[in-house]
Amino acid sequence: MHIDYWDAEGADVLTHTDTDEAIEACLGNMDVGDWPETVVVEGFVIVEPLPTSRIHEKIINVVLDDLDEHYGSAEGSAPEVTSKMREAANLFIQTVVSEYDGQPVERVKTVTVNSIDWIKENCPEWLTGTQGNGIL
């Protein structure tokens, strides 16, 4: 399985394309004494955004239900959905989706790595001078 992005658990923005890059970014921003015992990185794949046709029907129903609850007729007949309503809802949803600044991704894998073992293998220069302070 091809994984598009890797990042440390809980990252706000996904930018790293492999596990080592994500781990280095996580640990490289910490002081030596703050390194956690393990780092959890998560792998994500890009998914298709929700189809707007599914969403616009929900929007119309929510609005009509709310209007009907507050202003509906005594007979309780359900309001009819018109083609103009569908067009307006579709335009609204297309605008929201095009303006949305998110990443449509799904987490598909989680990997836990021992921090010190990873540093020894990938960035041993980070350990220079750490032998006497209990890191190793």
Image (cartoon, helix red, strand yellow):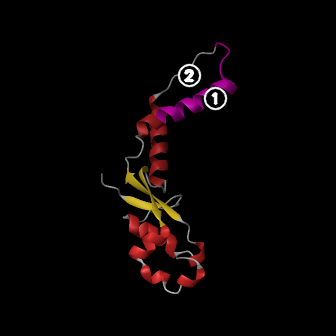
Q: Residues within 10 Å of mark 1 (few under 14, many from 20)?
A: few
Observer-nearest residue: 93 or 40? 40
Observer-nearest residue: 110 or 81? 110
Residue, disc 2: 79
- Above or below: residue 73 compared with residue 122: above
Label of residue 24 in the image: none
Secondary structure at badge 1 equals helix
Image coords of residue 27 (percent x, y):
51, 72
Residue occupying image coordinates x 57% and y 19%:
78
Contact between marks 1 and 2 (CB within 8 A): the answer is yes
Cα gap from disc 1 to disc 2, whole angstroms: 9 Å
Q: What is the magenta range?
A: 56-75
Residue, disc 1: 67
- Ranked by sequence position, the earlier of labels 1 and 2 is 1
Outermost residue, left direction?
A: 1
Q: Which amino acid type is shown beneath numbered disc 1?
A: Leu
Image coords of residue 99 (percent x, y):
48, 54
Outermost residue, top direction?
A: 75
Image quarter of residue 75: top right
Observer-nearest residue: 64 or 106? 106
Q: Which amino acid type is shown beneath numbered disc 2?
A: Pro
- Above or below: residue 44 compared with residue 115: above
Q: Residues within 10 Å of mark 2 (few under 14, many from 20)?
A: few
Residue occupying image coordinates x 49% and y 81%:
127
Q: Main secondary structure of the magenta part?
A: helix
